[in-house]
Amino acid sequence: MLDNLEEGFMVLDADDRVCLWNDVFPELLEMPSELIHLGAPALPMLRALADRGDYGPGDPATLADGIMAMIRSRKPAQGEREMVNGTIVEVVWMPIDDGCFLMRLRNVTTERAAARFKDELVTTVSHELRTPLTAIVGALGLLQGGLGGELEPSAQHLIEVAGKNADRLARIVNDLLEIDKLEAGMFEFRFEPIDVTAMLRDAIEQNQIYAQSRGVEIDLEVPAAPISAELDRGRMLQVMDNLLSNAAKFSPKGSRVRVRLRPGAEGMRISVIDRGPGISAEFRERLFSRFAQETRDAQGGAGLGLAICKGIVKRHGGRIHVNTREGVGTIFHVDLPLEQAPAAQVLLT
């Protein structure tokens, strides 16, 4: 059974001698077979890896002794190491019954290469988008300024909507370039009191044309009393743009997407409700991860939108979560405080 696994396993007994292993373990480490047998001590294996340079620069004997001391401490640990042959191995150590120690290895070279490729692709595409976006924003500004002649009111309104969306798209491109800063808490936010209802109306207006092109309408439900909150308006528009465009994209023709604002005991809740196909259980587990995409989404995308939303909402001291049922629909909830903690008022650079 162990030999059929894709991961490498080895168990050391209480005396740090090999008592169980599978074939993948030495194959993954490219370790000589004579070093692994029943009752073999662990230290010579570690020394062989150190001699080869898999533990990095330094005296091999000292490196091997240090790792052996960690194993003898029986403390759980995990991490990654790139071997001299370029293989990236994920390592998990954990104590088990009777003083034994389990070592588990997994080859993550392909996963890490794919992640690097996606990062580089997003960065390259974002850089390439900046120049034409700048031209589009500039041209729309000139039209709004009357350089192209007097415009009919309806045309003026469409250009204003297009200008707002172009500006927002430009901000999104910049955010894609700085997503690592966002996740590291180094993204710039500007918090100020805003009318949340007005912000939601603007978000709906900016997404209504796209929704209508798909045969979907967007409704807004707000309480009678206005709600004011300390938010970064631009960033929250970015969150709403992502949630509304997703809701419209996955909603059936002729349906309605509802945006609902409600006060809460500790703040407020914005909900985006659709009657789409719902989210599969498999995808739900990685919904807010970077580059996550639902396989049935034929339109594709970078798979960064919800990861960015999560980072923005978290930076506001809030929480984004989802209720979904396949075949019934999906509700995204964004819970936000009305006031930012003092630490949140400091702009991070």
Image (cartoon, rainbow, N blue to C red):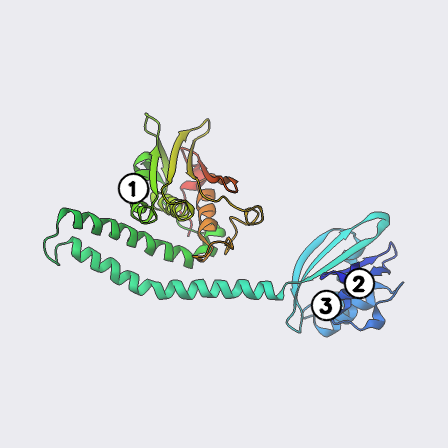
Q: Which residue is mark 2?
A: 22
Mark 2 vs 3: CB contact within 8 A: no
Residue furthest right as drawn: 39
Depth order, front residue of 245/196: 245
- From the viewer's perspective, is residue 94 above or below residue 59? above
Q: Distance between the Cα atoms at labels 2 and 3?
A: 11 Å
Q: Which residue is mark 3?
A: 28
Q: Earlier in the sequence, mark 2 or mark 3?
A: 2
Q: Which residue is mark 1?
A: 202
Q: Amino acid at mark 2?
A: Asn
Mark 1 vs 2: CB contact within 8 A: no
SS under mark 1: helix
Depth order, front residue of 331/194: 331
Depth order, front residue of 215/265: 215
Q: Earlier in the sequence, mark 1 or mark 2?
A: 2
Q: Amino acid at mark 1?
A: Asp
x and y percentages locating residue 320 in the rendered image = 48, 41
x and y percentages locating residue 141 in the rendered image = 20, 55
How packed mark 2 is, by other alpha carbons closer than 10 Å (few <14, some 14-19, many 20 or more), is: some
Which image quadrant is residue 247 in?
Answer: top left
x and y percentages locating residue 308 in the rendered image = 45, 50
